[in-house]
Image (cartoon, rainbow, N blue to C red):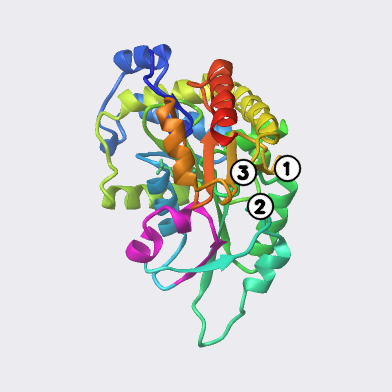
Amino acid sequence: MEQPWINFRSDTVTLPTAEMREAMAQAEVGDDVYGEDPSVNRLEELAAAKVGKEAALFVTSGTQGNLVSVLAHTHKGDEVLLEKESHIYYYEVGGMSALGGLIPRLLDSEGGIFSAEAVRKALRGDNIHFPRTSLLCLENTHNRAGGTYWTPAQVAEVAAAAKEAGLRVHVDGARIFNAAVAQGVDVIELTAPVDSVQFCLSKGLGAPVGSMVAGSKEFIARARKWRKMLGGGMRQAGVLAAAGIIALEKMVDRLAEDHALARKIGQELVNIPFLGVDLERLQTNILVVSVDPAWGTAQELLGKLRERGILATDFGPQKVRFVTHEDVGEKDAAKLIKALKEIMS
Ligand SMILES: *Cc1c(COP(=O)(O)O)cnc(C)c1O
């Protein structure tokens, strides 16, 4: 299907593949609130197996997946440790505080990654004045840091520090398959050390709707109840799950193409005046470019790109984010590079 724009705004813009649409049309369905949708049940089993957990839950979005996870791990008034620009803190409407009565404690990081030492330092110990700290969240890949990934060793190290202090660990793995593919490791190496993970079907994996939460059976039972309370108990959701199954079975390996394309673009942008690219942080499909104020602002650059039929997102007053995905290719990348050369010169 032809798209009117060259769209680098996000990998969420990917349209379902022809195979997904066919599977959606043919999906066997039932009422999932009664646990009777065979396609949803199959997706949940497949997702749990992929990330090496006992059980999984199909949720409406990554935001809902993170929220039900955080709620299922905590009690009202608890403190949650998370990175200061993490999606859960920055982009999820304050749900953990508004709906969970939770207080965030923010950790500094280097490119989205923090150390076990940083976790230990943030733990204040037992004292009548302090809230109970019950959860640590990390984000893999880290969106605002530019798609940087945690290695299995880094995850294991912080998870061990958290567990030592009695905390649970949740991974916002909206793009955890990007993290796995970029490092050439099985995703299980990134999920084994933690209690729960959320990942998106609707980003680079190309499904139209939905995310998965995975963890122990007992955790998923609690998350399922929270999902119902939040209005996420869907009925014949198998039409959506059918696309999710294809996303998981067929779309994971091709993420490598998105990473290669992002890198190719990044390497070209290094030579364009007034643009800054950190190639070290360009590890997956997210390319964050800084705009020199001597040229103008992120908004001005976005406006000029838009005139040429190209979309991207602002990531602050002087930063623009480009995301590669299935529906942009080499030709689009060439047009983007040409446009940027013209605009910046
Ligand atoms: C996109 C994203 C989410 C939320 O997913 P939605 O489906 O948009 O709600 C959560 N975490 C990260 C890191 C993301 O990039």
What's the residue type where badge 2 is placed? Answer: Gly
Q: Quadrant of residue 264?
A: top right
Please give the label number shown on residue 280: 1
Q: Is residue 180 above or below residue 145?
A: above
Please give the label number shown on residue 191: 3
Q: Circle 2 sits in a helix, a strand or a loop, which is it?
A: loop
Q: CA distance from mark 2 to mark 3?
A: 20 Å
Q: Quadrant of residue 1?
A: top left
What's the residue type where badge 3 is placed? Answer: Thr
Percent position of residue 27, x then y: 32, 17
What's the residue type where badge 1 is placed? Answer: Glu
Q: CA distance from mark 1 to mark 2?
A: 10 Å
Q: Is residue 202 above or below residue 192?
A: above
Q: Nearer the viewer, residue 331 or 256?
A: 331
Q: CA distance from mark 1 to mark 3?
A: 24 Å
User: Can residue 56 be seen from the camera position used here?
Assistant: no
Q: Nearer the viewer, residue 314 or 262?
A: 314
- Which of label 1 and label 3 is nearer to you? 1
Residue at the location (61% across, 51% down)? 194
Write down the region rendered in magenta: 78-100
User: Can residue 64 be seen from the camera position used here?
Assistant: yes
User: Is 38 on the left or on the right of 330, as rendered?
Assistant: left
Q: Nearer the viewer, residue 222 or 263?
A: 263
Q: Nearer the viewer, residue 15 or 344?
A: 344
Q: Earlier in the sequence, mark 1 or mark 2?
A: 2
- Which of label 2 and label 3 is nearer to you? 2
Residue placed farthest to the right in the image?
A: 153
Local packing at callout 2 (Cα closer than 10 Å; few below 14, some 14-19, many 20+) is: some
Percent position of residue 220, x then y: 44, 47
- The residue under label 2 is 111
Percent position of residue 250, x then y: 53, 19
